[in-house]
């Protein structure tokens, strides 16, 4: 088993959109999922991620997960885009993870992104050994190439050690990592000790995108790109093809998106992202219960704060 590393680029972790129905059961809004994926493809993103943290994967059952992945697959294909499709397939057990990966593969995903198990974290003595065993057993039988998803914020602060990541990178079916831990130093260590042709390290947030690129990362999986995808694609292309005279523009854009990236996610998470998408893109809707809507006052505060990034986004859109 030898899998191809995740190609470099901007991969957008999309929300899952829901219908606001009288029965309050919030079924998946497949039309808006498709609309958003097509919007991202038109902006030139390199990939789409379904069923990650931004996608409220923990709020969906297996049938709904497959529905979202199938919808995204169809939308990418109908857009004639070369964008890759990643599906979050996180489960606390090896068996459950493999089941989700199999379903994602059948629905059209090309890669599986997997969080480390964390439910029994306080009872786990040899955590590095558990992580190595978990990912190895998953990768040995997975129907798709595996991407490690390191996000301590949603895994009881479980932070996969850099040495463990390097060890796992040698597995032929583990092809990359999304680093939502934000540690540039850790990312640099991993880049130094892995082969970029076999293992792709991606920044997990727009605020640290450029620092990650400078130490060897090959792209980003930024939730912020849901509202300003062209900005991230443009910044990626500038860096990959830049001459010295473009360096100031690269620095300017990176500085300009740090504040917007922070305020879009920090105050109210997925709810705020969807509310701002509704304001900016005309769709977004509500998160699934028990998450609560973002109030009007906070929405206006966020909109004002992200305007510097949206200004660049509009400028880039006008040139397409």
Image (tube, rainbow, N blue to C red):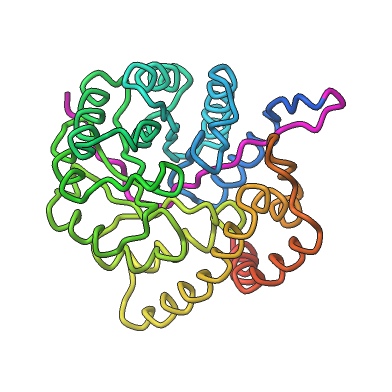
Left or right: residue 177 versus residue 155 is left
Please determine whether, in this image, residue 130 is positioned above or below residue 283.
above
Left or right of 60 in this view: 93: left
Q: Nearer the viewer, residue 104 or 271?
A: 271
The range drawn in magenta is 1-23
Residue 233 in the image, given as x and y percentages of width and height: 47, 58
- Residue at the location (56% across, 27% down)? 74
Q: Quadrant of residue 286?
A: top right
Residue 135 placement (x, y as % from top left): 25, 31
Query: In this rendering, is residue 302 above or below 226?
Result: below
Q: Is residue 268 above or below residue 38?
A: below
From the viewer's side, name the closer residue of 203 and 36.
Answer: 203
Q: Which residue occupies 68% across, 35% down?
A: 288
- Give the position of the N terminus as an image quadrant: top left
Question: Furthest residue to the right?
Answer: 22
Magenta: main secondary structure equals loop
In reply to whether residue 13 is colored magenta, the answer given is: yes
């Amino acid at each position: 088993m030898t899998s191809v590393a995740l190609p470099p680029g901007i991969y957008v972790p999309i929300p899952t959109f829901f219908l606001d129905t009288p029965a309050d059961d919030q079924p998946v809004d497949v039309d808006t999922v498709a609309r958003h994926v097509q919007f991202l493809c038109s902006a030139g993103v390199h990939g789409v991620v379904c069923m990650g943290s931004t996608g409220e994967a923990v709020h969906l059952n297996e049938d709904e997960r497959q529905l979202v992945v199938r919808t995204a697959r169809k939308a990418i294909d109908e857009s004639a885009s070369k964008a890759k499709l990643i599906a979050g397939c996180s489960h606390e057990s090896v068996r459950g993870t493999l089941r989700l990966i199999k379903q994602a593969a059948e629905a059209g995903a090309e890669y599986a992104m997997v969080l480390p198990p964390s439910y029994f974290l306080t009872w786990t003595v040899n955590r590095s050994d558990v992580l190595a065993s978990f990912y190895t057993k998953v990768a040995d039988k997975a129907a798709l190439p595996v991407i490690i998803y390191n996000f301590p914020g949603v895994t009881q602060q479980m932070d996969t050690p850099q040495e463990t990541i390097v060890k796992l990178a040698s597995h032929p079916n583990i092809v990359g990592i999304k680093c939502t831990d934000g540690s540039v130093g850790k990312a640099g260590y991993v880049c130094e000790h892995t082969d970029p042709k076999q293992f792709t390290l991606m920044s997990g947030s727009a605020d640290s995108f450029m620092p990650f690129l400078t130490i060897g990362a090959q792209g980003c999986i930024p939730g912020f790109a849901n509202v300003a995808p062209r900005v991230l694609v443009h910044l990626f292309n500038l860096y990959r093809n830049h001459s010295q005279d473009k360096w100031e523009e690269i620095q300017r854009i990176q500085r300009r998106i740090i504040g917007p990236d922070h305020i879009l996610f920090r105050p109210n998470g997925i709810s705020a992202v969807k509310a701002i998408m509704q304001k900016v893109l005309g769709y977004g809707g509500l998160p699934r219960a028990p998450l609560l809507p973002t109030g009007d006052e906070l929405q206006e505060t966020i909109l004002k704060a992200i305007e510097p990034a949206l200004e660049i986004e509009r400028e880039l859109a006008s040139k397409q």
